[in-house]
């Protein structure tokens, strides 16, 4: 039977996009939270920086930190060929808005007093240049991500959450050590293509999005999906049971429900709310 979404037929487009039912018994129309609109680009810059700092705190909370490895970037809305990054030597769990570094397309620090990660610049500069619709990118050496990356293969479509990456992720197979060459950054960008994620063989994971919220949630989900894949593959070999692959018709339909930018942005908001509560908003300074 072909999949459908009959429970959403009476919803407005915003609720439909995120799978929300907002019909109250008293007749009120309840609408899901959406990405804010800004009166000025300065307001948007502050918002992007706040959510970038939050993403670092959340990555630390989830164990995605490893020394000075890993980086998240967000494009500046005013100087659109510039992007904000983390300072190289500051632990993810300590990063505040005021710590963030603005760099230009030549890798020069425009705002900030700390060096940046050379690999971060090599990778992110090429992605931001090649994908003008991408405003954020995340890369880290998460345990499950780098474990799965050792196989140099794409994910199997075996869970609903894996379908977020249906035909929108790729594998970069040319491991070249620490990425300090802009040509290597270009090759990674080409491997990413128009997708939302890349598995960097023998290395880790990379995700992108229209917002830092979206890119960060894709990373969280991708790492969990790699974890699930590793567990399923191990169980399959041990039990003799064969995993079931979701067929293309169902996968394509579901990917539209769970893999859109609005759904990625929305899914991140609960993590943002949690980190604000845990830190009393300390990262906003």
Image (cartoon, rainbow, N blue to C red):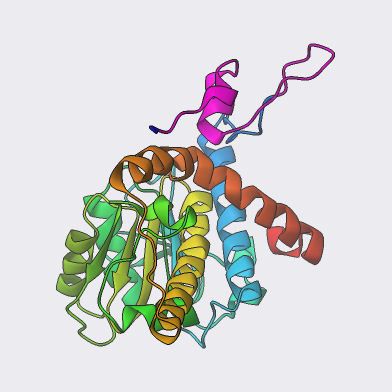
Name of the residue lying farthest toward the front: 240
Total numbered circles = 0
Q: Residue at x 31, y 64 (%)?
A: 198
Name of the residue lying farthest toward the top: 27
- x, y percent for residue 249: 31, 40
Q: Main secondary structure of the magenta part?
A: loop
Location of residue 41 with respect to 135 vertically, above or below: above
Q: Residue at x 66, y 31 (%)?
A: 32
Is residue 92 something one can see in this rendering? yes
Q: Is residue 54 left or right of residue 78?
A: right
- x, y percent for residue 232: 45, 74
Q: Residue at x 25, y 87 (%)?
A: 177
Location of residue 267 with respect to 31 vertically, above or below: below
Location of residue 10 with respect to 151 vertically, above or below: above
Q: Quadrant of residue 24?
A: top right
Q: Quadrant of the C terminus?
A: bottom right
Is residue 45 something one can see in this rendering? no
Location of residue 23 with respect to 180 vertically, above or below: above
Q: Is residue 244 left or right of residue 125?
A: right
Q: Quadrant of the N terminus?
A: top left
Residue numbers of the magenta segment: 3-30
As for residue 27 lying within the magenta part, the answer is yes
Closer-to-camera residue (131/105): 131
Closer-to-camera residue (80/251): 251
- x, y percent for residue 284: 70, 58
Q: Residue at x 29, y 74 (%)?
A: 200
- x, y percent for residue 250: 37, 42
As for residue 123 lying within the magenta part, the answer is no
């Amino acid at each position: 039977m072909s999949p459908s979404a009959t429970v959403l037929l009476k919803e407005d487009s915003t609720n439909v996009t995120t799978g929300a039912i907002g019909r109250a018994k008293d007749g009120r129309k309840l609408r899901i939270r959406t990405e804010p609109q800004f009166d000025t680009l300065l307001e948007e810059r502050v918002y992007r920086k706040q959510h970038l700092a939050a993403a670092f705190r959340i990555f630390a909370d989830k164990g995605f930190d490893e020394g000075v490895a890993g980086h998240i970037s967000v494009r500046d809305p005013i100087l659109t060929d510039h992007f904000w990054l983390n300072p190289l030597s500051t632990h993810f769990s300590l990063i505040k808005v005021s710590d963030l570094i603005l760099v230009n397309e030549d890798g020069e620090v425009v705002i900030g007093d700390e060096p940046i990660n050379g690999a971060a610049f090599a990778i992110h500069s090429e992605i931001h240049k090649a994908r003008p619709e991408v405003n954020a990118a995340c890369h880290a050496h998460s345990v499950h991500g780098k474990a799965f990356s050792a196989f140099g293969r794409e994910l199997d479509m075996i869970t609903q959450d894996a379908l977020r990456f249906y035909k929108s992720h790729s594998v970069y197979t040319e491991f070249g050590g620490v990425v300090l060459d802009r040509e290597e950054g270009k090759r990674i960008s080409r491997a990413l293509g128009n997708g939302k994620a890349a598995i960097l063989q023998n290395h880790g994971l990379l995700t992108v999005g229209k917002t830092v919220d979206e890119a960060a949630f894709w990373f969280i989900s991708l790492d969990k999906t790699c974890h699930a894949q590793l567990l399923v593959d191990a169980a399959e070999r041990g039990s003799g049971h064969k995993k079931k692959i979701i067929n293309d018709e169902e996968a394509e339909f579901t990917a539209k429900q769970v893999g859109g930018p609005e759904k990625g942005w929305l899914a991140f908001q609960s993590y943002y709310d949690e980190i604000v509560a845990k830190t009393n908003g300390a990262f906003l300074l």
